[in-house]
Amino acid sequence: MKIISIKTAFSLAQKTRKNQNIPAVQAIINQVERNGDLALFRFEKKFNGANLKNLLVSKKEITDAYKLVTKDQIDAITEAKNRLIKTESALKRKLGKIIINTDGTKITKSFEPLNIVGCYVPGGLARYPSSTIMSIVPAKLAGVESIIVVTPPNKQGKIDPLVLVAADVCGANMIFKVGGAHAIAALAFGTKSIPKVDKIVGPGGAFVTTAKYLVTNTASIDMLAGPTELVILADDSTDPKLVALDLVSQAEHSSDTKCQLITTSPILANKVNSEIAELLSSIPRKELVQSSLKKNGFIAVGKLSDAILLANKISPEHIQIMTKNPNKVAQKIKTAGLVLIGQNTPSAASDYLLGTNHILPTNQFGRSRGSLSMLDFLKIQTTIESSKPELQKINKHLKTLTQSENLPNHYNAVRKRL
């Protein structure tokens, strides 16, 4: 990884790239909107090499999937599910009906589940039963009636058995063999096979993220959760081997992940680079890791105060604080999707079993939201009931405001009741 100053890193963080995928993705979306399932079959053949006869995963396929996984794998899926349920249940207990009574007006606010949602589970270079868990569990706990999963098949038209088992264990209602931008379009507009959903959640590659952005006038989305991002903020108290391992662990997702180290120690910077070079001589998925770190990675060196400013400027998906006083530093990080504190809280563990959700905002959207949660599957329903005495009380001010906005019929609608 290149070693640069924090000042140079600031200039890199300020650069924005134009999304070159929009025209191609919009063309895919348009074809799905026009041609429905026919377009989906055609795109699965084109992009995944799969000759599909149907899109819906059958009950037999799910049953057969259980025969292809081990008890240990099922136990691990169940444990991840239960840990996430524990976290989300604690949040759910904080939510209740709110009633406000003011001078004859009763306002009620309640948290109501969405009716139908689509969960995108990525495939391609890796398999992600963990992402299956992270999207379905909070939806189920929120009380969503119908949970639809879409995920790309392999060339044989099969879904990874671990993904099928995870979806079944977590309570998906339907699973479809379709991925990419065309799957997002199918969820947004609906086809003969795939129902139109109220909201689309889940991470994906560049085309999937672009598609989610482009369908937001038709369906809600959770966030633009694109390729993985990791920033490690470390000082000379940190074990360089752990830093190298953590950077490599996230860089293996794909060649477009962004894994970066910000440090106050030039010595640590050089040691981490040496550790990475040593790891690259023997690790699996070497080509992906090397490509990712070379293309998108850097090590920035400077003062701690500047390091914190840079971390907040980058607004990464994950930030690991590996310093002498990690809790103190963590309090100053305001824009990351997830803050991991201390030497023993690696992002690799949070991806699976720490009880947090690994579907997180990227592309600096950590400035305005956090991880996926059951809140993403609820809407605040407001009801209001007024009375004649209350209308009488606000009559004077209502007249003033409606006249100020030149909307006299608003006032007439109220005055008639008085």
Image (tube, rainbow, N blue to C red):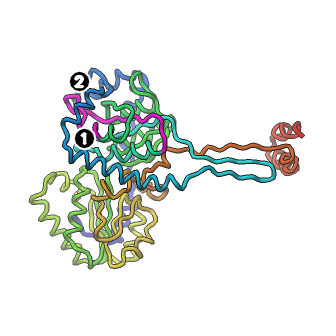
Q: Nearer the viewer, residue 86 or 37?
A: 86
- Labels 1 and 2: the sequence-earlier one: 2
* For residue 265, above or below residue 390: below
* Residue that carries the numbered disc 1 in the rendered image: 162
Q: In this view, does 339 lie to the left or right of 76?
A: right
* Residue that carries the numbered disc 2 in the rendered image: 51
Q: In terms of image quadrants, where is residue 222?
A: top left
| Visible residue check, residue 155 | yes
The residue depicted at 36 percent of the width and 47 percent of the height is 134
For label 2, the crowd category at 10 Å Cα-Cα, with few meaning under 14, some 14 to 19 and many 20 or more, is some
The residue depicted at 26 percent of the width and 56 percent of the height is 250
Pinpoint residue 394: horizontal percent, then vertical percent: 84, 50
Q: Is mark 1 on a helix, strand or loop?
A: helix
Q: Marks 1 and 2, how far apart in space?
A: 22 Å
- Give the extent of the magenta segment: 142-165
Nearer mark to the viewer, of 1 and 2: 1
Which residue type does callout 1 highlight? Leu
Pinpoint residue 329: horizontal percent, then vertical percent: 40, 74
The residue depicted at 39 percent of the width and 39 percent of the height is 119
Q: Is residue 157 magenta?
A: yes
Quarter of the figure that contains the C terminus: top right
Which mark is drawn over residue 332?
A: none
Q: Which of 47 and 89 is in front in this view?
A: 89
Pinpoint residue 399: horizontal percent, then vertical percent: 86, 46
- Most extreme residue toward the left, as rendered? 281
Q: Is mark 2 on a helix, strand or loop?
A: loop
| Visible residue check, residue 24 | no
Pinpoint residue 231: horizontal percent, then vertical percent: 32, 63
Q: In terms of image quadrants, where is residue 52?
A: top left
Q: In this view, does 54 lie to the left or right of 283?
A: right
How many discs mark residues in the rendered view?
2
Quarter of the figure that contains the N terminus: bottom left
